[in-house]
Amino acid sequence: MKKFLATCLVCLIGLHCFPQKMSKLYATYNKQDYAKCIQQCDAALKKKPEMLEAYYVKAIAYFEMAQSPSTYKEISKNPLLDCLSNLSILSSKDEDREILDEHNDTLLIIKQFAEARAQKIKTANTSEAQAINQRLSSIFRTKKADGLEYARLDAEAGRYDKCYAKVEKLYARSSAESASGSENYTALTQGAILLAENWMFSDLFTLIRNYKVKFAGNYGISEGFKKALLISIDTARTDDDKTLFYDFSKKGLELYPEDKGIYSHIEKRWIELINSQASAYRATASHERTWKDSVLLRNAYRYLALAQEVFPNNRKFQDIEIRLNREFHTIPLDYEKDLFRKYALEAVNTWRTKGCECDTSEIVYVAPVPTIEWDTTLERLANEHAKEMFFENHSEDVNINGETPWDRINKTQYKGVTYENENGLNFVQAMKMAFCVGYGQSFNGVSDTEEMKAVIDTVVTHWITEKRSQNCMKVMTPDVTHMALGMYGDKWVFWAITKYDILLRQKKK
């Protein structure tokens, strides 16, 4: 570096005739007596302040010291900053930039060196890095759009609170009418994007919420807010856990409820996510599917359910659900539901009427027990739990909210309520319950009702014949009166209760 810079200077000196005083300064510099050179520059400036080129010579002397700062520590604590400070002073005084332009090649060498230094220490010594960038900005008169540069350095150093404070202050102090030619305009269009690119999502949403109205009439700044919002949503979409994608999607629609562009972008991203999982599952048909393959289909439905919460009553997602149900037969189709109930009752009541042996760790013979009836409330509860098991990939009786089957029963009329009908005042309550879960069988590939009946029979038979299990005794519980069978994908739920329903007071005729 030293030899290269010295070579540049020799060429420059050879091309120009300097006044005698400047020649003396350059001569001392070329002798590499940098301390004496700086002293001579200070003396010259004190005697003749308009000798601006003395600032330049002083700066390059400090720059040479910056190549080996420990050697000159008694002269300068930070020779690079001293170099840039003198160039900054020169920049402010050399209004026509005659001297700076004349030495442009040397200045570019200094600039590259300083930028590399700032990049290297931006985390370990943020304050020095900021000082370097600030002086470079002054010397080369870069627009202060890069007042954001200091916020960017804070973000890269993990000082997120300071980064947000700088960005927020920029919007708070700027006029809503900031034009494209104003000093802070570029920074105002990029400030929100800086937060999004550094995953400062909570701060970003706060910034947009606080300032989107103020800058609503400024197209460039408003578009910066929207672009940052969409960056945050697209970033969250790449996370394996789609919780943030769901949350950010809802926040985006809340912040811009009437913006068709944002609505369309978020809608498109959800459709792409659902279709990608369904396509990946479809591609596994070439081999015998494993549980890992089933995760793909489960994800497609889980993401569909989340999308329907983000976009309630959106016809596109309703159509996707219909298409997936038809293709993968995840639940009974509408025209199959009555047959499903019929076959489920037959499968359970066939075992109950003939009796069976149950293996509860020891073999127990169960005599025939009364048949039971279908119940629509239990059907809803069973289907809801089967769907949760499918989405969350579990096979437990307790749901993700920690509720037991009895907790869910007690959210219905079966907790014990009175009601009136044509007969009078009645009371209904579930007095006993039987509950089984199962997995592994599905309607995927089932093409007719006989195949559907065979799958249902297989599920119920498994509960009856399962070894070292209480499921057989639950299906054969003698005094239950009503039941339902729920299914979703390869998850199944049997739910039965003893329905206590009596007439309390007969209606007067």
Image (cartoon, helix red, strand yellow):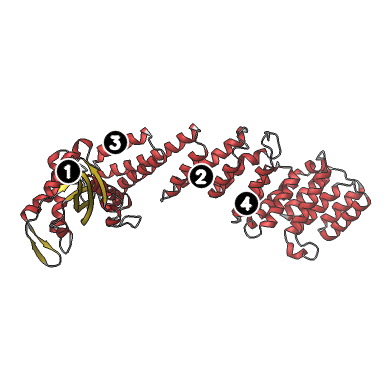
Circle 2 residue: 232
Q: Residues within 10 Å of mark 3 (few under 14, many from 20)?
A: few
Spot occupied by residue 273 in the image (x, y as percentages of width and height): 39, 42
Give the mark nearer the N terminus: 4 vs 2.
4
Real-space Cα separation, disc 4 to disc 1, in angstroms: 61 Å
Give the mark nearer the N terminus: 4 vs 1.
4
Q: Is residue 359 left or right of residue 32?
A: left
Give the mark nearer the N terminus: 3 vs 1.
3
Q: 27 or 204: which is nearer to us?
A: 204
Q: Amino acid at mark 4?
A: Cys
The label nearer to you, 3 versus 1, is: 1
Q: Which disc number belongs to residue 303?
A: none
Q: Which disc number belongs to residue 341?
A: 1
Total marks in image: 4
Q: Amino acid at mark 1?
A: Arg
* Label 4 close to label 2 by CB (< 8 Å): no
**Under tag 4, what secondary structure?**
helix
Real-space Cα separation, disc 4 to disc 2, in angstroms: 17 Å
Residue at 36% of width from left, 33% of height from top?
315
Q: Amino acid at mark 2?
A: Ser
Circle 4 residue: 163
Q: Residues within 10 Å of mark 4 (few under 14, many from 20)?
A: many
Give the mark nearer the N terminus: 4 vs 3.
4
Residue 326, placed above or below residue 483: above
Give the mark nearer the N terminus: 2 vs 1.
2
The label nearer to you, 2 versus 1, is: 1
Q: 92 or 436: which is nearer to us?
A: 436
Determine the residue located farthest toward the front in the rendered image. Answer: 509
Q: Which disc number belongs to residue 322?
A: 3
**Under tag 1, what secondary structure?**
helix
Real-space Cα separation, disc 4 to disc 3, in angstroms: 47 Å
